[in-house]
Amino acid sequence: MKDLLKGLKNSINRRSFMKNGLTAASAATVGAGLLAHSSSVFAQEGPEEHSGRLTRGDAALLRFAAAAELLETDFWVQYHELGGIQDSEVPGGSGSPAYAAALEVLDSDMAQYIHDNTDDEFTHQNFLNAYLASKGASTVNLEPFRTLPGSTATGSSGKLRLTNLTQLTLDTSWWTRYRSSTKNPDLGDTFPQAVPTLAVGQHTAIPRTDNDLNDPNFLQAIANTAGFHFPTIEQGGNSLYPSMAQRATHVEVLRILISIGPTETMHFQTWSDKAGNAPTLTAVDPVTGVSVTFPDLNSPPFGGEDFQTNLIMPEPCPFLSRKLPVCSIIRPIETKGIAMGVVNFLTAMGLFIGQPPEFFALLRDLAEDADEARRGR
């Protein structure tokens, strides 16, 4: 780890950095099946990688997707250890009955859905790295940055993490975005927050210690926060894959992106439905003093036909041009700067609080490479 960070600090520019072939310092795996031979976290220079099997752009797109899936798997594992169904299919943790019960207030199937979503993310990260390796391209290994402490509550495995679920600031504007029939973010429109207090301060979505289980009202607030974090994350992947697909060159790479993307949409639709069941409450974090209020989303300023909480289909909205008829679509799907936008979105969420500057530099490099991808190169 020290050698890795030293190499990062001493590099003058990222292109010379990439040419030197920075390699991961560890072959430790996140879960069964993750490639132990992952090599570089960066792309190699040149128009095509290893005898033209992948264009440089296609490799960069898949590498960024792999990095995103590694990070996504990391935080889903944390949710699963405490609130999912515990079995050999998704190992780790032993469950927190009190936290799981609070999640079940949103839906009785929450444990099953958390389990299945976690399993899906493992398959995404494993497949993308395996595909890159099969083409002789560099893969992604974030293990040197697995340094963040997670929950110490009973049920957690206590493993070090890549992501931080205890200091989240959530953008819940997706709730109003997908219910609007007149606005589209690709056309410059903005949307109000569904839960304004989640967009300020830092909120935990998992019990940090067993002390967080003592107050039932605060524990429900933690579960409600998780309930809104799930769709907030999945709607990001919902947009990422079709946005990147528009830049892919090879048909097989396009096939990968448009095949994984819809599963993110299925996740988002599931979780957006559960978030609508979050009970109304106000709670104050006994550790930080931060207050959160979950409003009745069936009442003003929301409510009504377009905002009733059991809506899970996207309302038709303007697409490409306001002169054309409205259409039910994924939004946004603008390709320009999509990868860097995802990095900024996840960073602003607080998901990486505690990571060193070198971690953010790595993500920016991967995002820049993905955003530079163009058809044919």
Image (tube, rainbow, N blue to C red):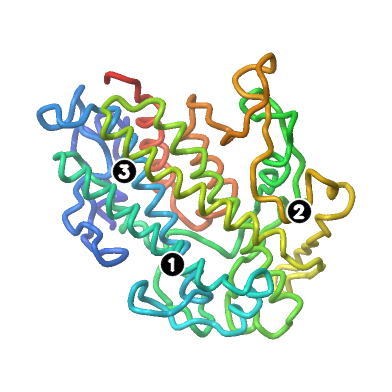
Depth check, front residue: 368 or 16: 368
Residue at x-position 25% and y-position 35% = 43
Label drawn at residue 8: 3
Say which amino acid is labelled 3. Answer: Leu
Residue 234 image point, x, y percent: 53, 50
Mark 2 vs mark 3: which is more N-terminal? 3
Extreme left residue here?
Answer: 51
Label drawn at residue 195: 2
Which residue bears the numbered disc 1?
A: 77
Say which amino acid is labelled 1. Answer: Val
Say which amino acid is labelled 2. Answer: Val
- Residue 34 lies in what quarter of the image? bottom left
Depth check, front residue: 165 or 253: 253
Residue at x-position 51% and y-position 85% = 154
Q: On screen, 313 above or below 1?
A: above
Q: Secondary structure at mark 3?
A: helix
Q: Secondary structure at mark 1?
A: helix
Residue 200 image point, x, y percent: 73, 52
Mark 3 surroundings: few (<14), some (14-19) or many (≥20) residues within 10 A: some
Q: On screen, 89 above or below 67?
A: below
CA–CA distance in space, label 3 to label 1: 28 Å
Mark 2 vs mark 1: which is more N-terminal? 1
Q: Secondary structure at mark 2?
A: loop
Q: Is residue 33 left or right of residue 114?
A: left
Q: Is residue 134 left or right of residue 166?
A: left
Residue at x-position 34% and y-position 35% = 61
Residue 196 image point, x, y percent: 77, 51
Depth check, front residue: 180 or 230: 180
CA–CA distance in space, label 2 to label 3: 39 Å
